[in-house]
Image (tube, helix red, strand yellow):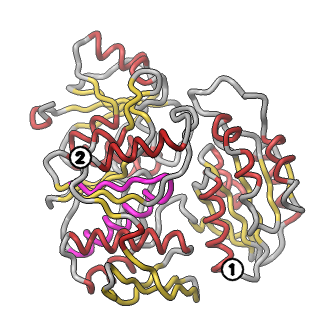
Amino acid sequence: MDWKKLKRIHFVGIKGIAMAALAVWAKEAGYNVTGSDVRDEFPSDDVLKKAHIPVRQFGKIPLCDLVIYTGAHNGCDNPEVRQAMQKDIPVLAHGIALGEVMQPYRQISVAGSHGKTTTSAMVATILSSAGYNPSWAIGCGEIRGLGLSGHFGRGNIFVAEADEYVTDPGHDMTPRFLWQKPDILMITNIEYDHPDAYASLKDVQAAFSALQSRAQMTIMLKDFQIQHIRFSHERTFFSLAFRGMYLGEFTLKVPGRHNVKNAGLAITACMELGVSHEKIVQGLLAFGGTKRRFELVGDVGKAMVYDDYAHHPTEIRATLAAAREWYPKNRMIAVFQPHTYSRTKALMSDFSNAFTDANIVILSDIYASARENDTLGISGKTLMEETAQHHLHVFYAPNYTSVEKFLSKTMQPEDVIIFMGAGDIYGWSRKFIQA
C-alpha cells in the first residue's frame, strides 16, 4: 500500500480501542479520517471526540481511498467492508494496517499477555519527555502525562502494542503482531488466553516465538534485576540493575509490583535507544497511568472508586495486590464482570482463586464477545459458586442495577471500590458515582 497517495481513510469498527488509536495517528498524519460503529458507548468515544473524528453507525460506505476494519463486527464480512470490496476500494485488517504504517520507522513493539498497554505507554511517555517526538498507537484511552492513545510524531520511532490475537477471526488466523517487524521487541509475559483462538499455552508460546524470530532485539524480564521495592504516599519506589550494572532509583505514580516490572522493561528499552538516565527518571515520573488501568474515577463520600481493565485472573490478582499495597488498611470491594464465555470457562479455576486481596467480591453476569453465541453452559452465577469455595464474602449481582443497590447498602467510609472487566462495566463506576 502506497500510503503517500492516500487522502481519505475509513475505519469500520472505529470504536475498538486499538482501532481508535490508529485512527488518531492517521488524523494527525494528515489523512481525512472517518469511522463507523454501533451506537453503544465505548471507552474510545472520548478519544475520538477529542481528535475530532466523525463517527456514524454502520451503513453505507463513504467516499474513501482505503478501508481499515476490525476483526470484530464480522471482520471482512461486515457489510461496509463488502461494499468497499465491490467498489474496488482497498481494505486492510487493523493488524496489517498497523504493521504497514510502522514500516518506515524504528519499530518498538510491546508484546505480552498482560502489561503491554502500560509498558508501551511508559516508553512513549519517556521518549516524548526526552524530546524524541515518537509516534505511537496504544490500546487505551488517554495516557495521563502524555495525551491521546495515538500520535503522529516527527521522530523516527514508532511505539505500538503487539497483540497476539488473530487478524480476522474465521478468515485470517495470523496473530496480529506478526505483521510487525520490531527493531526492539519487549515481552512482558506469556500466559494462556484467547481460548477461542489458541488451543493451548503451547500454541500461544509458538506465536510469540514466531514474533521473536522477526525482531532485531528482544528484551524480557530476565535481562534486568529489580531491587528494593517500597510503597509510600501513593508512590512506588524501586531500584534497577541491568546486566550487573546498577542504574539507580526510580519513582512511579502507579501502584503494583507488576508495574515495577513494566517500568523495568521500559527503562531498558529506552536505554537501548540512547535516552539518558536523567531523562528516563523524569519521563517515568511524568507517566500518570492510562485510562482503565487502576484509574481513580472519583469518590462517594470517603469511599474511593477505581476502574480497571483487568479481565484475566493474573490481571485481577495484580490489580488487587497493587491496591492492597497502596491501601493496606482499607476495606476493598472488587466488582468484576467476566468477559467472554470461552475465557471464563477455560480459566474458571484461576478466576475463582483470583480475589484473595479483596474483602468483598461482587460478580456480575458474563459479558459476551460479539463473536460468541454459545454460553457453554455457564453464567456469572457459576463463577460466583466456584469463587465462594475460596472466598468468604462473594455475591452475585447480575447487572449494574443490582450492583448499585448492593454497594449502596454495603459501602463504608474509606472503602476502596474497584470495578474490573473488559465489557460494558467501564461505565459502571461513573454511573455509580453520579447515582
Q: Residue at x 68, y 45 (%)?
A: 347
Task: Specify whether residue 127 is painted magenta.
Answer: yes
Q: Quadrant of the C terminus?
A: bottom right
Q: Residue at x 34, y 20 (%)?
A: 61
| Residue 32 at least partly seen | yes
Q: Earlier in the sequence, mark 1 or mark 2?
A: 2
Q: Residue at x 41, y 72 (%)?
A: 263
Find the magenta span and give its range.
107-130
Point out which mark residue 181 bears: 2
Front tag of 1 and 2: 2
- Identify whether 281 is placed above or below 369: below
Point out which mark residue 327 bears: 1
- Identify whether 326 is placed above or below 207: below
- The kind of secondary structure element at disc 1 is loop
**Pointer 2 local density, CA inside 10 Å: few below 14, some 14–19, many at least 20:** many
- The kind of secondary structure element at disc 2 is loop
Q: Nearer the viewer, residue 332 or 67?
A: 332
Whole-angstrom CA distance, mark 1 to mark 2, is 41 Å
Horizontally, residue 351 falls left or right of residue 284, namely: right
Q: Nearer the viewer, residue 330 or 114?
A: 114
The amino acid type of the residue labelled 1 equals Tyr
Horizontally, residue 344 falls left or right of residue 363, namely: left
